[in-house]
Image: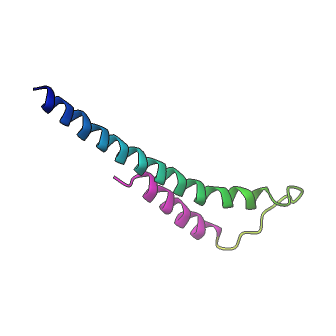
Amino acid sequence: MERQLQQQVIQTEKQLTLTSKEYKDRMEALYKLIMPLLINLQKDPDKEYILWPDRSKKMTAFIDKVNKIVEND
């Protein structure tokens, strides 16, 4: 009985490690997507407007990438 419990604990620990790594990878991917956007938006703070051709199309693609990472179940 004790051996069986030890095996269950080991199996659960392995699963938690995999899950933890998966979420860490997903958060890193989100960070790599979001930080360049924020840094570019931070540039030239004195400008009253941002010239961003095809903004709607690009933002839709960006939102899709974020959703794909977050909903990666």
- The image quadrant of residue 47 is bottom right
Q: Is residue 6 magenta?
A: no
**Considering depth in this image, is 56 or 40 the residue closer to the camera?**
40
Residue 23, above or below 62 = above
Question: In screen coordinates, is 66 left or right of 21?
Answer: right
Return the x and y of residue 3 as percentages of the image width and height. 14, 31
Question: Residue, x 67% and y 61% (percent of image)?
Answer: 36
Return the x and y of residue 70 as percentages of the image width and height. 44, 51
Residue 4, above or below 53 = above
Question: Residue, x 47% and y 54% (percent of image)?
Answer: 25
Question: In screen coordinates, is 41 left or right of 28?
Answer: right
Q: Is residue 66 magenta?
A: yes
- The stretch in magenta equals 55-73
**Considering depth in this image, is 58 or 42 the residue closer to the camera?**
42
Secondary structure that dominates the magenta span: helix
**Considering depth in this image, is 44 or 18 the residue closer to the camera?**
18
Residue 52, above or below 44 = below
Return the x and y of residue 13 as percentages of the image width and height. 31, 38
Q: Where does the N terminus fall, quadrant-wise?
A: top left
Residue 15, above or below 43 = above
Question: Residue, x 34% and y 40% (percent of image)?
Answer: 16
Judged from this view, the residue extending furthest toward the right is 46
Question: Residue, x 77% and y 68% (percent of image)?
Answer: 51
Judged from this view, the residue extending furthest toward the front is 3
- The image quadrant of residue 62 is bottom right
**Considering depth in this image, is 39 or 59 the residue closer to the camera?**
39
Return the x and y of residue 21 as percentages of the image width and height. 42, 49
Judged from this view, the residue extending furthest toward the top is 2
